[in-house]
Amino acid sequence: MTPVVLAHDYLTQRGGAERVFLSMARAFPHSQLLTTLYEPAQTYEEFAAHEVVPSVLQRVAPFRRRFKAALPLYPLTIRLMSPVATRMLISSSTAFAHGLDSTGCHVAYVHSPPHWLWESERYAGGERRLAARARPLLAPFRRADLRAAQRPHALLTNSTYSAGKILATYGRVAEVLPPPVRPRRAATPDDFFLVVSRLLPYKGVHRVVEAAAQLGARLVVVGEGPERPALGRLAGPGVEFRSRLPEAELDCLYATCLAVVVAGEEDLGLVAIEANAAGRPAVCLARGGALETIVHGVTGLLFEEERVEAVATAMAAAAARPWDARRLQRHASGWSEEAFASWLRLLAEEFPRWCGRCGGPGLGPRPLRTLRSITGDHGRRVAGPDPVEKTA
């Protein structure tokens, strides 16, 4: 039986959840990576160094390019992939992977309950008619997701904001384990703003494009998605679109931008912390995870309203003030990849013998905090601070 197996919904895009899963893979370099679909050209190239095991859906080539087309098939596919023969399954889930069964223990890192399923109006960009039409179709998926969310033996998540959504949706406590951001080098800033995002309606990228035009500012947008044609029509001559960049090129953009701009409500907002890691500030909507990651006036600026004028005002203010690159990088060091990997390794080693559902004495709803208190040599094996405790 394999000691540790890792799982993620689908490896067909480059997003924050896939970046976190890549850090999981680095923590367990010899583990199998299970997923429903794998398209190497569309996700991070580092996954190719690992043993990726896709589901039967992989045989349908169009699904690999358009993973949403397989939506009705995912719940059944997850059941067919179960049970996973392993002592310890760690899943990374934005949609379906938390529904896997395991012959051993299963801990799910739930980035958020699926946006398209539980926040369909926001996911559709405020199109209430579309969301209303979809609601009856989503009902069976919601019932299946509620059942799936009870299968893992413990839940982890990325922020107290996400933990609150998980508690409200699934009735379960999720312990907060800050996701990893790797260190970057700072550099002298250039004259452009930066957006790194999937191009979906709820991300609010259109407001940043319009704000840049209003300011006459240069803007680089890195990402792919269905909003790309509409954004191109909005864009002025100072807007440049890029996608699938090598890590070194993306690092350079982070380090030399005036600021990263995040105009949508995020569960955490990993991009803002990545900007801080490169010594640059973030301009973010004052909602969701940004309230946990941004220190207003110190590591970035928060704006209150989802309006182009509010985005433009905050962008101009960020460009006009000096920023302490070292202070920004110290702030970002709280999201350490070393600490993230250490916690997961402790979990993989100790959780199976303590898990109450596997016949052990039980660890309660916050297993990392409990394990640290009961494991005598934790100080030598776990780097970084305690996970953030979510108070219900």
Image (spheres, rainbow, N blue to C red):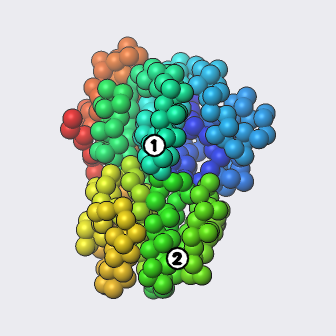
Which one is nearer the viewer's eye here, 188 or 207? 207
Going by the image, does 377 lie left or right of 15? left
The image shows residue 332, relative to residue 239, as above or below, that is above
Q: Amino acid at mark 2?
A: Leu
Identify the residue at the far left of this view. Answer: 391
Q: What residue is shown with label 1?
A: 128
Instruction: Identify the secondary structure beneath mark 1.
Output: helix
Which one is nearer the viewer's eye here, 97 or 235? 235
Instruction: Identify the secondary structure beneath mark 2.
Output: strand
Please tell me in which quadrant of the rendered image residue 376 appears.
top left
At x 44%, y 49%, the residue is 126
Classify 10 Å Cα crowding around label 2: few (below 14), some (14-19), many (20 and above): many
The image shows residue 190, relative to residue 264, as above or below, that is below
Q: Position of residue 353 (x, y in %)?
A: 39, 22
Q: Amino acid at mark 1?
A: Arg
At x 79%, y 40%, the residue is 61
Q: Quadrant of the C terminus?
A: top left
The image shows residue 194, relative to residue 374, as above or below, that is below
Which one is nearer the viewer's eye here, 51 or 162? 162
Going by the image, does 207 lie left or right of 370? right
Q: What residue is shown with label 2?
A: 219
Classify 10 Å Cα crowding around label 1: few (below 14), some (14-19), many (20 and above): few
Query: Mark 2 against mark 1, which lies toward the viewer?
Result: 1
- Separation of disc 2 and disc 1 at Cα? 30 Å
Going by the image, does 66 lie left or right of 225? right
At x 31%, y 84%, the residue is 321
